[in-house]
């Protein structure tokens, strides 16, 4: 019994010691969280944003999985990360990193995302990312990279997204992306490329789904610029410096869904090149210097659902039939085109599926009721146009109230200037005493019909005048003859003496 009690007492002492050590460890962990940081040992997340840190702390919980250190003064990724082998997410954006030592991430075999944006990194090589076997997202946006050498990212076989935008890259070796067999999204925008790196992109093959190469200095897109990227769904060429797109530049992009050509130098819509993109659903073309959207400008784009043409500095007119092939268009934005004064009659004809229309901030003085099926729209914007608020717009206030968009103000006539159109009734629009257009149409049709009937009657009378004249003569002669007979009859039977005398005349007797 004594022996058993002694063992139980020792066990209790050991349990108490373990609990005490755990409590001390927890207290120590809390006290070792650097000033300005938030350390959560339950979620294993450490956030040290804007904490004025010069280096990665080495006193954190070794089991942390997420480390966020944005907006600090960290200059290098040193051995500190070797202590944190469970990390899955590291954010060192907006620091002062100049270089990354070889094998700096060797211990981060579970790391999935690494963000090194907006530092001063000028170069990486094929040993920089050694050990990151599980990495799926790498962002180095906003650094000082000038060129991409062969095999720089060859260790990252599971990488899905690579962001190298906003650097100074002017040269890309054809083998720079070798090994990126899982890459789906690539950002090369806002660099100093003078041509599309077709040879370097080709090894990415059918795996690449999204490519951003805008804000470069291409000037032209040659034939087959994106050869081999047969499964590309999103292509961003905004601000790429393009003044020419060859007819076959987009050949091979059979499944492309979204394309941006905004903010380039295109003098006309590249209709021939676009016509190859039969599955295109979204197209952005604003901030280009073309003066007109001509008839069939988007020919062949029968699956187009969203089109944006905004801030085109010289756009003046949208011609009849400009969207005649785009029967599935659901959203159309023609906004902030400071010279756009007219949408020709029939410009929006045939857009039976259109539900969202933006015409804001143009120079439109008039919009007609038959321009589009206004009542089928879910939303429409007309604010910022110099609209003349006359009786012709009496149909619009009710719709503006339904859409609840930004106030649409009148520019003229003078008494209505700056008045919200949706607050004006028919009387204030100057058409209260007038018949509406339907009534006017009915009256006009009735008057026209009556005029036609009268004209036909006149024509028949004119052609039959001789027969009518002869018929009238016959009628008059017959009438005179009838009149004489009636007089004789009256003379015979109206005098009683004559009548009685006729009765007294002897009746002749026939002798037998």
Image: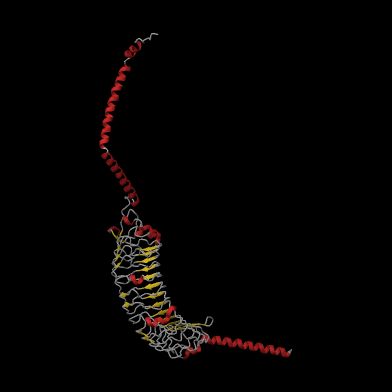
> In terms of image quadrants, where is residue 504?
top left
Q: Where residue 88 appears, x then y in whole percent?
A: 49, 83
Which one is nearer the viewer's eye here, 502 or 142?
502
Q: Is residue 10 above or below residue 320?
A: below
Which one is nearer the viewer's eye here, 379 or 448?
448
How many numbered marks does the figure carry?
A: 0
Q: Is residue 34 above or below residue 489?
A: below
Residue 272 visible in rendering = yes
In the picture, the quarter occupied by the N terminus is bottom right
Q: Where residue 291 appears, x then y in whole percent?
A: 28, 68
- Kindly identify the residue that appears in the image at 27 percent across and 35 percent down: 468
Residue 184 visible in rendering = no
Which one is nearer the viewer's eye here, 189 or 268?
268
In the picture, the quarter occupied by the C terminus is top left
Say left or right for 437 vs 8: left
Which one is nearer the viewer's eye here, 308 or 210?
210
Farthest-out residue, right? 1
Q: Where residue 91 appears, x then y in whole percent?
A: 45, 83
Say left or right for 115 vs 291: right
């Amino acid at each position: 019994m004594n022996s058993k009690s002694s063992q139980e007492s020792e066990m209790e002492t050991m349990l108490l010691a373990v609990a005490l050590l755990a409590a001390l460890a927890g207290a120590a962990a809390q006290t070792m969280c650097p000033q300005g940081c938030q350390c959560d040992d339950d979620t294993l997340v450490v956030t040290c944003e804007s904490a004025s840190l010069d280096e990665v702390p080495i006193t954190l919980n070794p089991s942390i999985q997420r480390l966020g250190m944005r907006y600090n003064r960290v200059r290098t990724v040193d051995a500190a990360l070797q202590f944190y082998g469970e990390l899955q997410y590291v954010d060192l954006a907006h620091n002062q990193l100049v270089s990354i030592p070889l094998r700096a991430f060797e211990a981060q075999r579970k790391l999935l995302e690494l963000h090194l944006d907006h530092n001063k990194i000028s170069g990486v090589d094929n040993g920089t990312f050694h050990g990151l076997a599980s990495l799926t997202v790498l962002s180095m946006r906003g650094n000082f990279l000038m060129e991409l050498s062969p095999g720089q990212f060859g260790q990252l076989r599971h990488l899905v997204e690579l962001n190298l935008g906003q650097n100074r890259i002017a040269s890309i070796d054809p083998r720079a992306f070798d090994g990126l067999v899982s890459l789906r999204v690539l950002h090369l925008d806002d660099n100093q490329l003078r041509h599309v790196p077709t040879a370097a992109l080709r090894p990415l093959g059918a795996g690449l789904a999204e490519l951003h190469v805008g804000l470069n200095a291409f000037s032209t897109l040659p034939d087959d610029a994106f050869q081999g990227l047969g499964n590309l769904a999103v292509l961003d060429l905004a601000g790429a410096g393009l003044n020419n797109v060859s007819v076959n530049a987009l050949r091979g992009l059979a499944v492309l869904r979204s394309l941006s050509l905004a903010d380039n130098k295109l003098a006309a819509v590249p209709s021939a090149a676009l016509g190859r993109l039969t599955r295109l659903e979204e197209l952005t073309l604003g901030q280009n210097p073309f003066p007109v959207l001509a008839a069939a400008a988007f020919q062949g784009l029968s699956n187009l659902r969203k089109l944006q043409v905004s801030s085109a500095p010289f756009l003046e007119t949208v011609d009849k039939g400009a969207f005649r092939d785009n029967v599935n268009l659901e959203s159309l934005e023609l906004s902030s085109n400071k010279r756009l004064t007219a949408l020709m009659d029939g410009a929006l004809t045939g857009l039976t599926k259109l539900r969202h229309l933006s015409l804001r901030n143009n120079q439109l003085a008039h919009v007609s009721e038959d321009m589009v099926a206004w009542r089928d729209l879910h939303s429409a914007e007309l604010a910022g146009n110099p609209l003349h608020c006359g009786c012709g717009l009496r149909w619009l206030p009710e719709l503006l109230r339904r859409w609840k968009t930004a106030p649409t103000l009148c520019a003229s006539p003078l008494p209505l200037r700056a008045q919200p159109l949706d607050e004006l009734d028919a009387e204030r629009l100057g058409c209260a005493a007038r018949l509406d257009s339907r009534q006017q149409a009915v009256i006009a049709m009735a008057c026209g019909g009556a005029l036609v009937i009268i004209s036909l009657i006149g024509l028949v009378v004119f052609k039959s005048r001789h027969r009518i004249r002869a018929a009238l003569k016959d009628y008059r002669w017959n009438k005179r003859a009838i009149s004489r007979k009636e007089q004789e009859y009256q003379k015979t039977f109206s005098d009683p003496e004559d009548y009685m005398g006729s009765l007294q005349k002897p009746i002749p007797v026939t002798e037998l």
